[in-house]
Each structure stands twice: as C-alpha cells, then as structure tokens.
C-alpha cells in the first residue's frame, strides 16, 4: 500500500516522533508505514485522515488502485 504520510508530515515540519505522538503509536510504526513495510489498521488510517483533514484515499492507496491508473 502506497501512502503520502511522509510528504504530509514534512509539509507540517513534523518529525516521525511528532506524528507518532499525534496518532498514539510508536515512531517505529510511523517509519514502517512510510517505508511501505507495514499497512496501518483501518482505525489508524481513519485517525490519520482526521489528523490531516483528508479522506483516507487521499493518504493511502492500495496497489490495485495504483496499477489501474
């Protein structure tokens, strides 16, 4: 699953630790998500969407959706 977390985080000058604190997860979790080594749970994806005031689809895209475009 591709995501825009790193870009969105950088636009706000947040560190991985900052984002982790806002989402109530570890910095390692943020790192793994940003490097596409871990897909977030649905509740975590919703939490990130609320934090950035975006739709989930604006942050996360599954590989099938990317391949169709």
Image: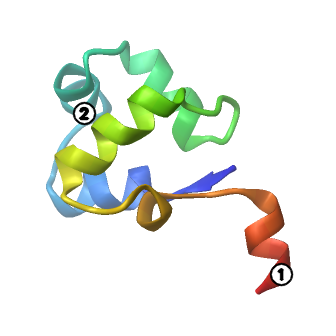
The residue identified by callout 2 is 19
Is 44 left or right of 3, judged from the image as shown? left
Mark 1 element type = helix
Q: Residue at x 19, y 58 (%)?
A: 53
Q: Is residue 10 above or below residue 26?
A: below
The residue identified by callout 1 is 68
Mark 2 element type = helix
Q: Residue at x 48, y 20 (%)?
A: 29
Q: Quadrant of residue 63?
A: bottom right
Residue 20 vs residue 47, the one in the foreground: 47
Percent across and percent down for residue 66 are 75, 72
Q: Is residue 19 above or below residue 6?
A: above
Residue 40 vs residue 14, the one in the foreground: 40
From mark 2 to mark 1, how far is it between C-alphas? 30 Å
Marks 2 & 1, CB-CB < 8 Å contact: no
Residue 61 vs residue 35, the one in the foreground: 61
Q: Residue at x 67, y 41 (%)?
A: 36
């Amino acid at each position: 699953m591709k995501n825009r977390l790193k870009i969105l985080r950088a636009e706000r000058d947040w560190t991985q630790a900052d984002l982790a604190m806002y989402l109530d997860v570890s910095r390692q979790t943020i790192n793994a998500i940003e490097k596409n080594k871990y897909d977030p749970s649905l509740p975590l994806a919703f939490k990130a969407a609320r934090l950035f005031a975006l739709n989930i689809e604006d942050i996360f895209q599954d590989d099938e959706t990317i391949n169709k475009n």
